[in-house]
Image: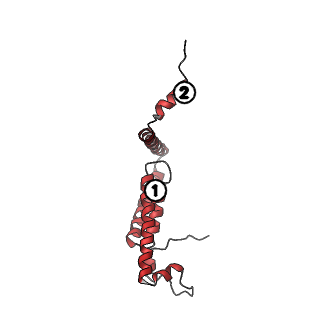
Amino acid sequence: MGVSRVATAEDSRAGGHEETADPPGRLDRIRATPAGRLTLRIVIGVIGAALVVTGLIMVPFPGPGWLVVFAGLAVLATEFTWASRLLEFAKDKVKAATGWLKRQNWFVRIIAGALTLLCAAAIVWASVRLTLGIDLIHEARDLLTGPPLST
């Protein structure tokens, strides 16, 4: 099973077809006209920007925030060279951080995991408290201690 690669803006500007007999794809036919090229760039820009903004909003919450940001950058990278460079830069930084963490001993890994969980829990608590007005810590304490005993 081979590794697939996202086509980038640099690929489309470089011609896209390396001496193959493949017929031009749908995107190549759209790019063939100036109006099609502009329309495609606008559509890709709006979709990619929406994904990046949505992912950035999701980042503080537990879930796939950064994954959505990277997906948005990958979409943008299909038409914009700057997005392709930014995506490569971000992937390099993530690989470096992951590599550093893998080289650490178990104690540092456990501390890093505990800090990550603590930050996620604090974000969830603050979000629920500020949006719904519910203090999860108070509710959990009431749930664990039970109702007050009447005499």
Sooner in the amino-acid sequence: mark 2 or mark 1: 1
Residue, x 50% and y 28% (percent of image)? 141
* Residue closest to the far left: 82
Is residue 139 placed above or below 26 in the rendered structure? above
Dot label at residue 144? 2
Residue 3: x and y in percent read 56, 70
- Circle 2: is it few (<14), some (14-19), or many (20+) Cα within 10 Å? few
User: Which quadrant would residue 92 be assigned to in this image?
Assistant: bottom left
The quarter of the picture where the C terminus appears is top right
Which residue lies under the disc numbered 1?
Answer: 66
Residue 120: x and y in percent read 46, 44
* Residue closest to the far top: 151
Is residue 66 placed above or below 28 in the rendered structure? above
Along the viewing direction, whichever of 11 and 58 lies nearer the viewer: 58
* Residue closest to the far right: 1
Is residue 68 placed above or below 144 in the rendered structure? below
